[in-house]
């Protein structure tokens, strides 16, 4: 480009930085809106918790629900029931089966969502049966932007905390060194909480026994040692974000990015739509989402195979922050 | 599930429908916010247009811009310049080269962005050299939600319109039959405009000549016929959305979905960040975005290869509507 033109392009870039600063304010206002709407969702989520835990029994009116598929299933069931009176009698023979609320509601979600089941260990399951609710709380206006996930437990034999928390700190301003990479608020750090485990119940550590031989005397003694153990509850003891300039390996970055993704997923998908993850309806959507991405990626790959691996360090995905979908409604109804 | 539990799950689903209705109101407020911010961006975009068209020359202060890379390039250039005084003299010999504004600013963007260059034909290029600005206008409060892309042209030898428009109608409410698929506003229809072409200048049609032989007399005459021609300007004469129930083939749906994606891309990426598409900086981001998606998709494919092609008709991608990114800032700085 001729120098005079280059000069003008620089002027446009300066304008673009100003745009990024305005955009940051826009996202702050969206955050405020989210706080406002959190209050509107609150009574509905309270009601959900009460139904899940069995504190209230919904009225018949509150339970009215029909979908073609379910009706068909119900019809098929009725036919089946009539055919095998024997089975019906067996069922009646178990009157003790009167489940409270929706048993294992949250545990079922943990098992169904890949991102969470990857963390879930067998020893976590009996603990998560006591999970009553997951809530999100937003930072107050004027405070640094953040959100806190609250995991509410009923009294249980594992720890004393009634609530386990995980706080995600966010940043909603363009980076001075990279103003154009700004795409809305980002998670930049997180903080867990101390779990007050009952003695011997901490599933995040395991005790191993080691035999030690005394060098001089030749006597053998057994020592016990506590080592970290895989568990979902390590979610509350996350990695610390390393200060700038410190050496960070790939594992570290992957673990941190995964943790941030999980926090984001709780906030944006699981908490607002828990019942759909419980029934599996939301999972189908997510899966077809991934498939679609794969197809697009494949095409991209064919067109521009040369540029492979150029930007490996850049985890700048899902940049459709605060954007509408471009898909026609028609396609969704197929 | 036992019937009593199923009943409670239905109650949760009813609550979930209420959540979707609240969410719809949230997105309406976000739309209002976008209108509000459009007014804040307006003076900056006006300034951009004036610099691009050469109406104003930015001051030195307005053009201050340094980045390490550019400084290096400039240094290298200086060395080069000193070495070949000959070339410099040649350049000086062309004093007529005093480009106005930033020549071919928008055309360059059209050429660089795959989604647009796919539509671009050679005969479109001289016309797009006259494109002065692209703007987005939002629907007024109380009106059905929509946005209009305005393509502003300087007087040219091709058509009389000063502005070509494309309006995208949106829907921001859950579908009664599918309330859980609601993920924020969607484009549901679009409307182009009539282009008042100068005689013989309409690039969206081509004239073909056909020889016809008279059956009885055996005389031959030449008839001319106008047939559709590939051109970006067909963007202003889009397909109509077929009413529900009408047969739609795959081609139709693909064309419609592509048109909606392009409209969305103009609104959300090109208009707000035009200079970054001109310089190519935004393109790099988009490419690494696609690569990342591919990697995720691959993993998904390996885990659940069985479920292939199950939801082919579902174009429900990019569902991160109004969500923040879960990526740690650290990863971006690598």
Image (cartoon, coloured by chain):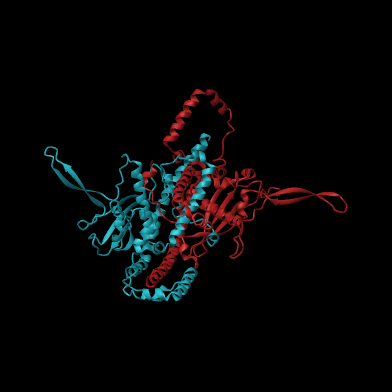
Chain colours: A red, B cyan
Q: Is residue A249 left or right of residue B40?
A: right
Instruction: Name the spot of residue B246 as percent of width and height, x first.
Output: 31, 40
Does B332 appear above or below A235? Answer: below
Q: Nearer the viewer, residue B168 or B253?
A: B253
Residue at image point 58% right, 46% down = A118
Does A11 appear above or below B281? Answer: below
Residue A270 visible to the viewer: no
Instruction: Name the spot of residue A39 as percent of width and height, x first.
Output: 47, 55
Q: Nearer the viewer, residue A43 or A279?
A: A279
Q: Nearer the viewer, residue A249 or A157?
A: A249
Q: Is residue A150 left or right of residue B145?
A: right
Q: Nearer the viewer, residue B281 or B47?
A: B281
Quick one: quadrant of the N terminus of chain A? Answer: bottom left
Residue furthest front as drawn: B86
Q: Is residue A282 left or right of residue B220?
A: right
Q: Is residue A312 left or right of residue B194?
A: right
Residue furthest right as drawn: A217
Q: How many marks?
A: 0
Instruction: Name the spot of residue B123 as percent of width and height, x first.
Output: 29, 57
Residue B159 visible to the viewer: yes
Quick one: quadrant of the C terminus of chain A? Answer: top left
Q: Quadrant of residue B116?
A: bottom left
Instruction: Name the spot of residue A124 as percent of width and height, x first.
Output: 63, 45
């Amino acid at each position: 480009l001729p120098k005079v033109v280059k000069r003008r392009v620089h002027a446009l870039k300066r304008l673009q930085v100003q745009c990024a600063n305005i955009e940051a304010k826009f996202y702050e206002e969206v955050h405020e809106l989210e706080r406002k709407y959190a209050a509107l969702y609150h009574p509905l989520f309270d009601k959900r918790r009460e139904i899940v835990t069995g504190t209230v029994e919904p009225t018949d009116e509150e339970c009215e629900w029909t979908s073609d598929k379910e009706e068909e299933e119900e019809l098929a069931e009725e036919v089946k029931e009539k055919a095998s009176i024997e089975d019906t009698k067996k069922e009646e023979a178990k009157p003790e089966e009167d489940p409270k609320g929706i048993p294992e509601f949250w545990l079922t979600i943990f098992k169904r969502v890949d991102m969470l089941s990857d963390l879930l260990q067998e020893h976590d399951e009996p603990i998560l049966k006591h999970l009553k609710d997951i809530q999100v709380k937003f930072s107050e206006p004027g405070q640094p932007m953040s959100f806190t996930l609250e995991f509410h437990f009923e009294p249980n034999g594992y720890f004393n905390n009634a609530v386990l928390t995980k706080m995600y700190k966010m940043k909603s301003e363009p980076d001075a060194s990279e103003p154009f990479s700004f795409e809305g608020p980002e998670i930049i750090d997180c903080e867990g909480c101390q779990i007050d485990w009952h003695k011997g119940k901490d599933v995040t550590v395991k005790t191993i026994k080691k035999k030690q031989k005394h060098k001089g005397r030749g006597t053998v003694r057994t020592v016990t040692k506590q080592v970290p153990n895989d568990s979902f509850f390590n979610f509350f003891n996350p990695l610390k974000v390393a200060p700038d300039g410190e050496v960070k390996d790939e594992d570290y970055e992957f673990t941190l990015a995964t943790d941030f993704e999980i926090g984001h997923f709780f906030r944006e998908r699981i908490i607002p739509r828990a019942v759909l993850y419980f029934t599996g309806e939301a999972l189908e959507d997510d899966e077809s989402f991934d498939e679609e991405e794969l197809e697009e990626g494949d095409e991209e790959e064919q067109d521009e195979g040369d540029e492979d691996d150029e930007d490996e360090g850049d985890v700048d995905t899902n940049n459709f922050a605060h954007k509408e979908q471009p898909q026609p409604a028609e396609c969704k109804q197929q």
